[in-house]
Amino acid sequence: MKNSLKTVIASLLVFSMLLPLLASCGERAAENGGEGGSSVPSQGNTDVQPAETEEKRIYADDIPDDAKCNGQSVKFMWWAENREFAEEYTGEVVNDAAYERELSVESRLNVDIVNVGESYTWDTKDLYLDKIRSSVMANDGAYDVASGQYATMPGLVADRVFANLKDLPYLDFSKPYWVQQLIEETSVNGKLFLATGDLSKVTINQVWCVMGNDTMRANLGLDNPVDLVHEGTWTKDAMNTMLTGVYADTDGDQVKSSGDTFGLVIAEANCTYPFLNAWEISYTTLNEEGYPELTFYNDKTVAAWEQMMAWCFDSQDVAYGGEGYVYFNAGNAFVEGRTLFNIGQFASVKACVENMEDSYILLPMPKWDVEQAGYYTWLGESNTLFGILTSAADLDATAAAMEMMAAESYRLVSPAIYEINMKTRYSADQEMSRMFDLIRGGVVFNFGLVYGFAMNYMNIFWKGNITANGNLSSAWKSQEKSYKAAIDQFFAAVEAMD
């Protein structure tokens, strides 16, 4: 344990949670976190019948209560800049929830959670990945669990640094604290090397959405898009109709510039990515054998490309902030009431609305058309993936710790972020809280996007050609064979691991 005081605090923490719930260790938790229980009789009521002996446990996981790891240290390598772990109580709600998570895991499993923060930037990403490779090769025990950006972590799979998570005990990817669609989409030949979920707070913060200025919408006499969402008619055409004609030369310089008012802001090429998932456009589709076949280029993709190019380069009502085009601070423009719709992430809601005078609304990414079944979105490429290293000192203890860290994040940390920071503190009303739930429930993944960096940078094809204002057809034809070869090579490398 980190120290005896932490052990005492952890025990008191667990006891304080057990007491009001009268939780029994013999019953599995429900998927909603397992919280519940019978009422506790007051001291003055002597006629109350004894409480039931069978109560739901407080834990969301199914790790056996007698699973103990004999004081084994489990070292988590974190992307330091994301500040995913805590070393002490500070009074900040998310930090303290993360600290309690680790105290709970340590007390219950008899492990020592060691957090190792390593700096990661786009310029130093290769150094970060090399630290993982080198640790495994040297078997130096520096890390047991490695986490990192999902744009780059999959590139390590073929280097044999990650254990097959499906071979390890305790890990249960059917649980709600793991992102199941990612598990299904990124398993390779029945093997799973990386996973994500509530273990990372970025899983919430990186969800993409549409933020709308409701005051501007009302002043323009437009329909409420929230109603359209519920009707299933919030589509690209509906958004296009609303944003058309909104442009105004607010700063009076007689040119389209950062001080003007716009119907839609696409701050940079990265902000076009969510539309791929929103419109069900995938680089790859898994066949019956679980092999990802290239399915990107088709009539729908061409139509989507034409819509995006029209917005970014031809529409007076849309501000695109890509290189060489209108540059401005999208957040400031929204807060200042000069943007009807802004494409952003949950993480940007706080920054955009804390000082905003106008009323605002939160919306999912629009559907392609009314025939589309649901509203879908993208989890940004800065999302965190987790893998257990083959050099881990104790694979079983590491698996147990990772599973319970995810479960306790689901029970403690995510509510602190989602319910307190987002759905309560930064939500205008209960309707927006429902929108948070709807949007997050629409996160989907695609093999080609997740593993793109390991496959000739397939994942940046769309963004790269938006940035270059290029020709989609010729660009795809020039790259398609290399992408197919990269997929074949990747799968061959994974098969060779047997």
Image (tube, grey):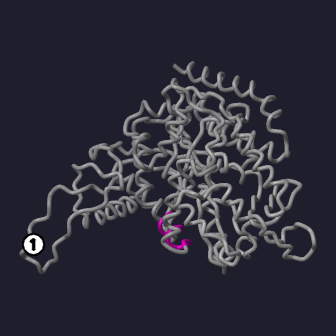
Q: Is residue 327 left or right of residue 414?
A: right
Which residue is at the front of the view, 399 or 248?
248
Residue at (35%, 51%) from the top-left corner?
31
Residue at (50%, 53%) from the top-left corner?
441
Q: Per the image, is 467 magenta?
A: no
Which residue is at the front of the view, 309 or 455?
309
Amino acid on which disc 1 is placed: Val
Which residue appears farthest toward the right when viewing the image?
254
Which residue is at the front of the view, 67 or 6?
67
Residue at (56%, 66%) from the top-left corner?
226
Residue 381: x and y, percent?
65, 47
The reply to whether residue 117 is visible in this rendering is: no
Quadrant of res 32: bottom left
Q: Per the image, is 419 magenta?
A: yes
Label 1: few (<14), some (14–19) or many (≥20) C-alpha neighbours in 10 Å? few
Quadrant of res 366: bottom right
Residue topped by disc 1: 48
Residue 388: x and y, percent?
50, 37
Q: Which residues fall within the magenta stretch? A: 418-427
Under circle 1, the secondary element is: loop
Q: Main secondary structure of the magenta part?
A: helix
Eyeballing the image, is 261 above or below 209? below
Which residue appears farthest toward the left when viewing the image?
47
The reply to whether residue 77 is visible in this rendering is: yes
Residue 312: x and y, percent?
80, 54
Q: Is residue 381 left or right of residue 104?
A: right
